[in-house]
Amino acid sequence: MRSEEDTAYEVAVAPRKGGEVLQERLQAHTPLRSAADPDEIAQAAAWLLSDCSSFVTGTVLRVDGGARA
């Protein structure tokens, strides 16, 4: 049986090793059925740095396509 550590390691390393199969499996379990573009991650970071988020405190902004929903 595989541990959560093994799975987390594969998630972190697979994109660097050309893990297309793992990438497809991860996308299949994400409600939006796609991986984030770097621009989507950057937009979330830009929003956090902007005045629009000035009243946001003590929360985690998950930019994961609903994977942990």
Image (spheres, rainbow, N blue to C red):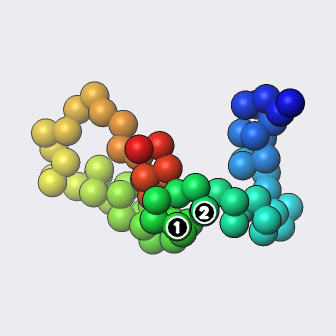
Residue 16 location, quadrant: bottom right
**Residue 37 location (% of width, % of height):** 51, 71
Give me the residue at 36% from left, 37% from top.
Answer: 60
Tell whether 8 sits left or right of 36.
right
Quote the CA–CA distance across marks 2 and 1: 5 Å
Give me the residue at 29% from left, 50% from top.
Answer: 48
**Residue 59 location (% of width, % of height):** 30, 33
**Identity of the amino acid at label 2?**
Gln
Residue 33, numbered circle: 1
* Cβ–Cβ under 8 Å for marks 2 and 1: yes
Residue 32 location, quadrant: bottom left
Give me the residue at 29% from left, 52% from top.
Answer: 49
- Give the camera-side residue of 49 and 33: 33
Give me the residue at 69% from left, 60% from top.
Answer: 25
- Give the camera-side residue of 40 and 11: 11
**Identity of the amino acid at label 1?**
Arg
Residue 3, numbered circle: none
Look at mark 2 in the image and give the residue it sits on: 27
**Residue 62 location (% of width, % of height):** 41, 46
- Give the camera-side residue of 31 and 49: 31
Q: Earlier in the sequence, mark 2 or mark 1?
A: 2
Q: Can residue 38 be seen here?
A: no
Badge 2: residue crowd in 10 Å (few <14, some 14–19, many ≥20):
some
Assign the C terminus to one quadrant of the image: top left
